[in-house]
Amino acid sequence: MNYVIIIILTVLIRIELTGGFFSRSPRDGNWRTKSHFDITATGTVRAISKYIKANKGVGSLEDFFRDDQNGQHTMMKKVFALRKAVADTQENKKDTAYIHCHADQIFLAHNFVKSCQPKLISRKDDLDEFTKQLGECLYTIQSFYSNTNWVEMYGGVAYGDFGINTLMDVASLEEDTCLDNADYNSECKNNIRVSGKLTSGYHHGRGNTKPSKSIGSSTGKCSHGGPDDDSRKLVARCGINKDSITPEWSPHFHLHEQAYIAAVQATENFLVANGTGVLYTIGPKIFEDVFHVKRRKDMTLAMAIDYTGSMVDDIDAVKTWVIELLTNTVGSSYEPADYVLSLFHDPESYNSAYKYEDGYDMINKVQRIESIAGVNPDCAELAAAGMLGAIKLMRDDSPLYVFTDADAKDANRTQDVLDAAKAKNISITSILTGQCGRKKRSALGRYERSASSLSFFQQIAEATGGSVHETDKENIRKVLESVIGETFPSSEIIIDSFDWSSAETDDQNITVDSTITVLKISVTGSSAETDVDIYYANGTLETYTSGKSTRIYTSSGETIISIQHPPSGIMKLRRNIINDWKVNITAQSSIKVDSELLEQTKTGEMFSLKGSPISDDNFTVALSVYGFASNGTCHTIALTDSTGNVISSHEASQLRRDLDTLCAATFSTPHAEFQVKLYGNDDSGRPFTRKLSELYKPASVELIITASTDDVIIGKERLIGYEVKNRGTVTETYQVSISDDHSFANGITVEEYTLFSGDGKNGTFAVKPITPSVIFSYTVSVSIVSTGDVQQSITRKLVVTDVERPDCSVVHMDGLCGISSLNTANCSLYNWNASAEVTFSGTLLESISSTVGMSVKLIHVNITGLSAGPIAVNISGDCCTPSLHVNVIDVDGFISQCDLSFGGGQSVQSVEVVSEPSGSSETDISSVIIILTVCVTVVIIVVITAFVLRMHQTKSKDALYRSKSIPDTTRKEKFNAKMIYEKQGLSH
């Protein structure tokens, strides 16, 4: 059963219970609990299926991708990238309560989803950033159904107005929403006391603190609940989350299935709902790009190659990687209908064009290309003629790839090329390489192509839907993989890779499973194609006479063997010449593996590793295996070094999910570079291996980026905060640096720190964008000064905008909530006040509020109609609310929060309610008089005693300090207050 069938089962047959609102896998250990992974994958596939049915003239995904398995595979990779973005939001935004719909901050969550539309539009030209933003939006949408009481009121249906239209009533921040339940570690089905309005639970550790109630209170705010939420122990105890089907983790476990169904439907609606979905925000073309809703037609793979003398340095690189591409596609389901090769030169009489039905014929022709000096000494070549020669032989709706290092001598034929290309709907992409003499050196020493040449290639690319890429022979492979790979992707999986030392004389075994359609063996370091032979499991030697296999030797010293539909079993690779070789074995197969390394939070949640793994730290290898049939299994995961030797291996845990199978194992990070290798059995029981291409380099230093990901305003500086920590065993000097792709880095770009083992430092860099409406990337790297070895490198992107969204910053804080004030009996006796400033321009403000409601007072000017700041906000309250956020929202839903904390991170403690004494009013008065008399008498005695003691103690100051006195709690409070003031940078 391939994953198309699995998709159909998921989409058309059922949406049943298995996984809730854990980010990736069920932390409660129950395979029927569904996660954000499951919700995102199922909801997104349903949305794509709905789009295909409405717009592509077919009834299902299976029909649409019937003849294009690669298109189906690429679509699934897009879906899996989105579900990773959703899952990572839980950790990346863990301290922002409204992202999780916690703490009755549902109106903020509603506005956050509302802001997704303009955020997605600004990222539509960068699909990776678009996917990340879409993931954040979907995370909040999905969390709504587990963390609020919507499902308790309306069941497993999506709330169509959330994030779009007017939000229904939300419980006020002063309103008690849940009944207290003493058994807070289990279920509490009927604990919600509000009806007809929304509420949600507080979750300590997610950027919010639950309001305290006096001990004995029967009502209070709801908690999220579960073992990682300490707020469940505070009135109202227990919780309301529907994350799982396990009572200990989810007090409302009985509604998990309905919450899942609603979240899946909401995911689908957000993507394709008529008039409001992402599809209608960005349009069908970008929607199809985001999710690769495309299928390959019968088309020509065409190349026009400049083979003049100036290409002598580049032609071998072009040939090597073109042959690499061709051997990946020949015989596979991704193979083009035919091939065209156009060779151009100057004069035009040197030009020729060829068409081949057989991919091996194309390979042989490319193999024989040699650069030839022409009779014309000038640099420019007849590129337009080369394009026209190829177009003449091509099928309609096909791509043409042009390789040259020269300017176009016949640029006057631009219109001829455009007319011919448009008549057949041919897209033309040019890969410009080398250092032809007409180019000039830039100030940095690089060669720059003339403006007229770039204009020629760029004009043709823009008019035909192609692109232009300037590169060199060292980087041409990356360009080809990204440019040609989208249309004719190899979709290769790696079976194995290893160094074959001359000291090893035994044959090498190659595991061929029943799903492999094309097997490719590359031997680097060989001297001739006959240096190596391949034998089948039955001992038969491959002779390359069947027309379904080939063996070629390239000018780069590589022997390539390609075999179509090899029989399953253990094949043997035998060497005829003894040398040191590098062997890479790849294949086309329906079993594919997507990987990520995961770290575990203190609460047990898993999130994607950022940067390089730290030596000796534990990490989890999580492999998503798709294309598995019902009987497929994975049994071992290994780490191998760069030469192919196994460093360590562990038995794999396996969990079947809706669209894939999770195979995972936990390792201690080795000190050497490593790759991940999976061992298993296919559906027929045959063994298979898959090796992941990523090479991980362990580090001894930890790097954390603490900068905001919000859009950055043109002309304004954005600080990029970082933390660097020496996780090694010796003192080391590190260099931390920042770079970016638009030269926006501002001020200091390099810092050095000498750190003892275990020590760390914080620092900041700055970027200041000067170009509007761009998305730029910056990279923060850490290297060891003594060796220059880069240990960590993390890249992020920012969107530049000319609209200054609200930005709230604290200006002043006055007051302190010490230990004595942080209890429900007298917290109201201690006051504080603060001021903040809100800046904005080019937008209108919708509201300014706090996360604690009417318990604090906000004073500011009338914001109606204001289109620019700054404005001042005065805030006052008491120690019953020692911490809060001030929320500023604009009309598009963009949110900024000021964080105010007067209690040093400590919360208000619950104490017993003081009961009114019973009896008559006369008795009350008499009691008061008696109590006051006793109190006055005690005070007099204490004062006299203290005076006598002081007279005695002054005789010996040393004796005073040695005496056992009552602890000075006042002094302790002052000490704590000083610490808090210093921490917050306040005067006192």
Image: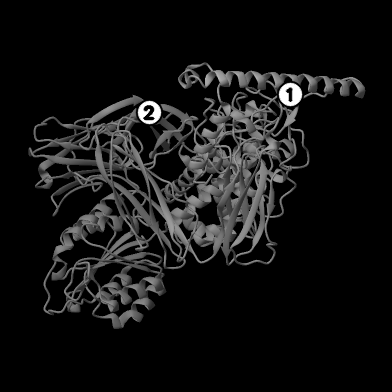
Between 985 and 287, the one nearer to me in the picture: 985
Q: How many numbered discs? A: 2
Q: Is residue 963 in view?
A: yes
Label 1, label 2: how far apart the Cα atoms are: 45 Å
Question: Which one is in front in this view, the residue at disc 1 or the one at disc 2?
Answer: 1
The residue under the point 34% across, 28% down is: 667
Between 940 and 899, the one nearer to me in the picture: 940
Tell whether label 2 touches label 1 (CB within 8 Å).
no
Q: Which mark is residue 216?
A: 1
Judging from the image, what secondary structure is the residue with disc 1 in? loop
Q: Quadrant of residue 98?
A: top right
Specify which label sits upstream in the sequence, 1 or 2.
1
Name the spot of residue 790 as percent of width and height, x first. Answer: 26, 46
Q: Residues within 10 Å of mark 1 (few under 14, many from 20)?
A: few
Q: Is residue 261 above or below residue 360?
A: above
User: Which residue, as the protein is rendered here, is positioned at the far bottom?
Assistant: 412
Judging from the image, what secondary structure is the residue with disc 2 in? strand
> In the picture provided, is 429 more to the left or to the right than 110?
left
The residue under the point 71% across, 50% down is: 167
User: Label 1 sits on what residue type?
Assistant: Gly
Residue that carries the numbered disc 2 in the rendered image:
666
Between 406 and 705, the one nearer to me in the picture: 705
> In the picture provided, is 658 more to the left or to the right than 300?
right
User: Label 2 sits on what residue type?
Assistant: Thr
